[in-house]
Amino acid sequence: MFRRREPVPFAFVAEADRFRGNVAPPPRERASFGQMAGRWLLGLTLVAGIAGALVLGMPALSTDTHAPAQQSQASQGR
């Protein structure tokens, strides 16, 4: 970026992109065994739910071309 030659009323705003703080975030504490097990169980439940929905929903989504088409009595002229 180019540097301005004229004075800027708020120079600290103009040069804010070059500022770096020296404050580091605190280190993250490790998750406990119970939290890890809970996350795994939640993930496994979600995956099992999606897989179950696919297994149960696939027959409804499939088109059965081998079955004869059923005709109603009205279409047979009775």
Image: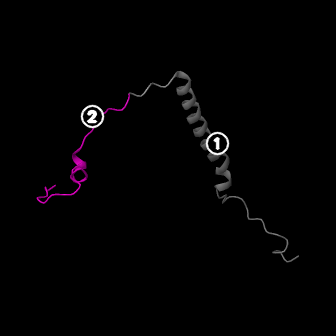
Q: Residue at (38%, 29%) from the top-left corner?
A: 26
Mark 2 and mark 1: Cα distance apart in space: 51 Å
Residue 20, image x, y percentages: 25, 40
- Report the residue at 44% width, 25% height from top: 29
Q: Which residue is mark 1?
A: 52
Q: Main secondary structure of the magenta part?
A: loop
Q: Identify the mark at residue 73; answer none if there is no mark.
A: none
Label 2 vs 1, first from the N-terminus: 2
Kind of element beneath mark 2: loop
The residue where tag 2 is placed is 22
Residue 56 location (% of width, % of height): 67, 46
Q: Is residue 49 above or below residue 37?
A: below
Q: Looking at the rendering, in which quadrant would you find the N terminus? A: bottom left
Instruction: Provide the residue span drawn in magenta.
Output: 1-26
Task: Say few, some or many: other residues with alpha carbon within 10 Å of mark 2 (under 14 / 14 to 19 / 20 or more).
Answer: few
Badge 2 amino acid: Asn
68 drawn magenta: no
Numbered label tally: 2
